[in-house]
Image: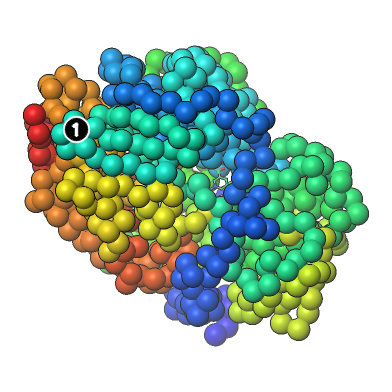
Amino acid sequence: MTAPEKTERDPHLWVPQRKVEDLEWFREKYAAERDKRLPNTGTATFQAVDFEGKFASFDSDPHAAGPRAQAPMTEELDVLIIGAGFMGMSAGIELDKRGVSNYKILDVASDFGGTWYWNRYPGVRCDVESYVYLPFLEETGYMPTERYVRGSEIFAYCRQIADQFDLYDRALFQTRVTGMEWDQDTARWTVRTDAGDVFLARFVSTQSGQFSRPQLPGIPGIEKFRGAGFHTSRWDYDYTGGDITGGLHKLRDKRVAVIGTGATGVQAIPQLAEYAKSVVVFQRTPSQIAPRENAATDTEWFRNLPEGWHRERRATFDKCAMDRATADCEVDDGWIKFAKFQMNAIYEAGGTEPTLEQFMDAMERSDYEWNEMLRDRVDAIVTDPDKAEKLKSYYRTMCKRPGFSDDFLPAFNKESVDIVDTSETPIDRITETGIVVGDREYEVDLIVYATGFQQGRTWTDKAGYDVLGRNGNRLSKKFAEGVSTFHGFLSRDFPNLFFLGFVQSTQVSNIANLIDHQARHMTYMISKAVDEGMRAIEPTPEAEAGWNETILEHAEMRRDWNTTCTPGQYNNEGRVDDKRSTLVGGLYGPGYEYFDLLRKWREDDTFDGIAVTR
Ligand code: N01
């Protein structure tokens, strides 16, 4: 293979200037990069470490002021909402709008915020524009200070939402559900917690908690390390000094290792690079890094947005990011710029009605061209050619979540910052003093684990409790071979229990929009059931089987794509044929198709596919 010729490129240029002719070169190169990771694939590489003993602090709450103040309670509720992140808050607010106010929101954390409660690492920000990411902007009248606001601003905004919508009165924090069981006679869920509470709830809302359990890599010797160590979602500012905005002054004399270069690593590494004596980054797969282009909010523009702008902007963002990118897509960020570039390529190839061949060819070619531009950008920014080469990603856009940053690549121009490519030679072991790759040991004082969150476990394993449904059916048993729901919301034999999140729903760039749709859909079902005196609702066997069939058909449509992608969260870590992982997935098409399906189902107002017990 001979690589295509390189050209000088301005790092700030957005539009790829080079036409890709030799598709075969790229196909071979991408396959070779993917193959490096294949022997080292599967979720097994992540899970060896449990949060016990030395690692207990990795899963504890560094932000709680003390133990829970409330005595154990027994209460009857219309709805118990588990999880106080965007989803739990949205569910509560939508229930109130529909006149269902006897609910409680439970969380292990000691405040609202979910992922924004836990993730307080330096540099954390939203990576989707805040004007589409943050919920309830019109209702609260809140103006985000920047296009991509800091995590601390999002956390503070969550508290503001909870205040404005009176959610604190209905919240119970520092409380973990330990199990629940359906009582057929009373048509209630009995939910127990680790604090000794017993809730009798007509309906329960659960979230899959996609990013709730930190994941530590199963590297041999990890427990032997004598220095400091923490996961990015449990940042130890006592050790590093500083706060979410930086200022990690206590690291001036410290040698730091970072494992992981996903969205979190990309945001945290520049902060570590600025303060630590030295930083060595252990990278298995490079993130694709496009410009971030953050900016202060244009106050006048924001104040003059017309009524209804927020939902409209969110919907347009989803459409534009997925497959309807046109020149007038309002949010002109990295997601949309790429989508527009692809749309133009398709149009150039086949006009408004391209053949399938023209369509596929244009998609592939333009993807390579786009990534050539981003690789040129690495060359233009990173002065050391060896480091630059390691930082270039070779997989199609959306094989992994795209990264956006203006300070990640420049951080590698510091002599104190090194990068170790572990794609072919994985980390061999962790010793008392450092990290060993091949025959070299990197001695460090601190290991920061930017290794993401547990994905591959079963639903009940991730939730941390089991569910005993109708006729003694256990959820862990039912889901052992794969999740099974109707529209992602309800599962037979587990009446009135809602599953929210990515499971069997759809894939979107802006998860907050999915949450909005799901909260409205669930609360429609609950309020209709309450108003019309339904005791229990669950899918008919046919409806549930039909949805599972649809999910499997859609997984089949994704198969070729998933096979060519480097292993990651989006392709079940490369295990394309694993049915249990496949069944977790959502529809293949753009998010708005799923939202339209839900909307039409609600408009129909017949509960089609639902078995009702009165
Ligand atoms: O986690 P990740 P994250 N040896 O799973 C590496 C979202 N998010 O915390 O790519 C070596 O993405 C792993 O390597 P590889 C974000 O969108 C949103 O960064 O598997 N390396 C990877 O580099 C994402 O969906 C915002 O080869 C190991 C990294 O660790 C989710 O949160 C901000 C390893 C994990 O990357 C999680 O992102 C931040 C091992 N054994 C994050 N195990 C917003 O702003 C893992 N890795 C909204």
Q: Can residue 589 be seen in this view?
A: no
* Mark 1 Cα-neighbour bin, 10 Å: few <14, some 14–19, many ≥20: some
- Up the image or down, 609 lies above or below 285; here it is above
Whether 295 is drawn above or below 548: the answer is above
Which of these two is toward me, 169 or 151?
169
Q: Where is residue 133 in the image (x, y as percent from the top left)?
A: 48, 34
Q: Give the quadrant of the N terminus.
A: bottom right
Quadrant for ligand 1?
Answer: bottom right
Which residue is depicted at the point 12% across and 21% down? 532
The x and y percentages for residue 494 are 22, 44
**SS for callout 1:** loop
| Residue at point 50%, 80% (across, down) | 39
Q: Residue at x 66, y 50 (%)?
A: 57
The residue type indicated by label 1 comes to Ala
Q: Which residue occupies 67% across, 62% down?
A: 259
Image quadrant assignment for residue 388:
bottom right
Residue 470 lies, in percent from the top left, at 18, 45
Q: Write down the residue under mark 1.
A: 187
Q: Is residue 43 visible?
A: yes
49 w.r.t. 26: above or below? above
The colour scheme of the drawn protein is rainbow
Q: Quadrant of residue 189?
A: top left
- Name the spot of residue 455 as percent of width and height, x first: 45, 57
Residue 201 placement, left or right of 141: left
